[in-house]
Image (spheres, rainbow, N blue to C red):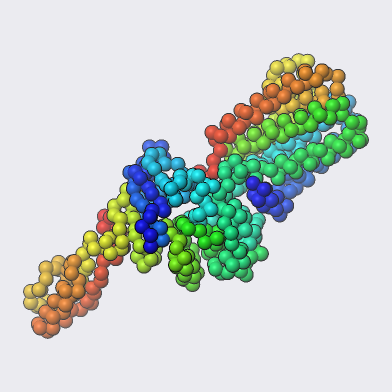
Amino acid sequence: MSTSPVIEVERLNLKYGDFHAVRDLSFQVRAGELYALLGTNGAGKTSTLETVEGHRTPTSGAVRVFGHSPRDRAAVRPRMGIMLQESGFSPDLTVRESVALIGRLTRRDDDVARVLGVVGLTGKAKTVVGQLSGGEKRRLDFATAVYGAPELIFLDEPTTGLDIQSRDDLWQAVDRLREDGSTVVLTTHYLEEAQQRADRIGLMHQGVFHREGTVAELTRTLPAVITFTLPGAAPALPLPGVAGAGGVVRIETFQLQKDLHLLLAWAQDHAVELSDLSAGATRLDDVFRAIES
Amino acid sequence: MLTIARSELVQIFRNRLVLVTSFVMPIAVSAFFVYRHEIFAQLGSLGYIAAVVLFTVGAFGLYTSTVTTLASRRQNLFLKRLRSTAVSDAGILAGLVAPATVLSLVQVSGILIVFGLVAGRPDNVGLLILAVLATMAMMIGLALATAGVTNSPEHAQVTTLPVSLGVIAVASWVGITGTENLELVKRLLPGGAATELMLNAWNGGVALSDSLILLAPTLAWVVVAVTFAVRMFRWEPRR
């Protein structure tokens, strides 16, 4: 993966009337990486994404894509594919015509039949878009984004409305594009997708970045949690924990493996049964909840 | 632009409702005027019939269909999709407007040629062409402006009425009563000067310099409409 930035955002501000949607946002996306822009509802991630795509004009600040303004369509659009959050196709055109039209207008070369094969729409090539299901429209949207294997791909909620098989197929296609060097910018509400695939994540809340980094960097800021239920007459625990109703104990730790081992050894030594024992590393969901609270 | 225009043409011919309301109906109405031209010529003049034909096609075949198309393409986010490509905003609009413009020009040309064969040729064909082109430019400008305040294709059925009925009414008023009275008012109304230009081009009897000056109000309407469109046109639906 190259470290040269494909996207540079510096002190971006977006205002809609009196509403300040994005405040002083700065980040970079490096060539070849999958960067996930995540956030709570109304955090400003779609506004940010659409500004980077060139659909919106910043109130202030600078955005550069491949060293150009993203509004310089002739310079940047042949190198970037955009999967919008909502479809935006003419209901009277067929699937084949829609992909060919957008492909030609983005000035990238590809074979329409090949792209339809990648997204599993070969059998729908002659169907007009108005007759497609929601999931099929999302796949059509993805097809136009990856037509010509662009260097930079924006995926805005790409798997919303897709069944599991279609999601898997989409991520396989993204993986192949990344192997060929494409950079991907992703927004999604499915945090497990970002956790599994993102090289780096920017977490937005109320228009600002709360945290940015790799999954490991983000999750290590919060403790892992061990929970279990103790019987009534148990000896003192080897670790500081919080006892709740019904004897449920919650232990927070930044050294999960070591403390879990210590706890299990203690239980073994004192012949204590730890009912409903559960231990899990910190997940992105936990980081999200911490931000929201 | 040509790619978008070709795609737009395909969509027009696949949508029977658009085809009937924007292209079949104006031709039918115009055919009626041509067929009963002796009656309408007594009411106004042969130039009046030519002007009414021009404004009927311009109002329904071009103006209304363009507003409806732009509102529809905006509502289903097709405009946003097109802006995700390498084509400029001007190229997108030109591509979307071109098919209806060309079809309208073909309609007007065809009907006026038939009208000329049936009722006698116009006095000044060059001036007639100028009047047709200026009127079409005005209708496109008004369509872009109206599209800015039109939220949906259904809304277009309401927002297009004032201009489409208005220009036909002005054409009839000027065509039947002439401009001896209320000359300034009639010339400044949208379509008024263009109608007078059509009358002069078809009927003759007016000095060319006196006719050419009538282009100014029509082109002024183009400027006003485009200025309004630049301020009001939206590429995405209101949220």
Q: Residue at x 55, y 51 (%)?
A: B85
- Does the image show residue A134? no
Foreground pick, A215 / A178: A178
Against B113, is A208 above or below? Answer: below
- Does the image show residue A190? yes
Quarter of image, res A198:
bottom left
Foreground pick, A233 / A47: A47
In-image side of A264 versus B11 (left or right): left
In-image side of B183 versus B77 (left or right): right
Quarter of image, res A261:
bottom left
Quarter of image, res B202:
top right
In-image side of A158 versus A209 (left or right): right
Against B179, is B64 above or below? Answer: below
Q: Position of residue A80 (x, y in %)?
A: 49, 55
Q: Residue at x 52, y 51 (%)?
A: A77
Looking at the image, which residue sits at the far left?
A: A235
Q: Residue at x 28, y 64 (%)?
A: A216
Q: Position of residue A157 (x, y in %)?
A: 45, 59
Q: Position of residue A213 (x, y in %)?
A: 30, 58
- The number of numbered badges drawn on the structure is 0
Q: Residue at x 10, y 77 (%)?
A: A234
Q: Position of residue A224 (x, y in %)?
A: 22, 67
Foreground pick, A274 / A142: A142
